[in-house]
Image (cartoon, rainbow, N blue to C red):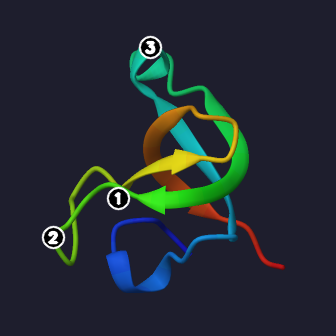
Amino acid sequence: MDGKKRGSIKPGMKVAVVLKKDQASGRLTEGVVKRLLTNSPDHPHGIKVELESGEVGRVKRIDPV
């Protein structure tokens, strides 16, 4: 699953995001969604979320439970 649809992402889910500082390299950071920051139903670069660690990035992958 990818992170381009807001409806497929919920708080508490484990995801992989790309942080702003890692956009050039594409390095992914894994974490658990604390809250969704993108209000639109979809976004071509991924839905922006805040992780429980406080980091903010765009979802690139949703990990299965």
* Amino acid type of the residue tagged 1 in the rendering: Ile
Which amino acid type is marked by label 3?
Lys
Secondary structure type for disc 1? loop
- Locate residue 39, reporting x and y percent: 20, 66
In the picture as drawn, the residue positioned furthest to the right comes out as 65
**Disc 2 or 3, which lies upstream in sequence?**
3
Q: Which residue is mark 3?
A: 21
Three-letter residue code for mark 2: Ser
Callout 3: 10 Å neighbours few (<14), some, many (20+)? Answer: few
**Disc number at residue 64?**
none
Q: CA distance from mark 1 to mark 2?
A: 9 Å
**Residue at left 47%, top 83%?**
8
| 40 or 64, nearer to the observer | 40
Kindly identify which residue carries mark 2: 40
- Residue at image mark 1: 47
- In the displayed structure, 43 sits above or below 30; it is below
Secondary structure state at the residue bearing disc 3: helix
Residue 6 position by quadrant: bottom left
Residue lying at 60% horizontally and 46% vertically, measured from the top left: 51
Q: Quadrant of the C terminus?
A: bottom right
Say whether residue 41 is left or right of residue 30.
left
Residue 46, placed above or below residue 53: below
Q: How many marks?
A: 3
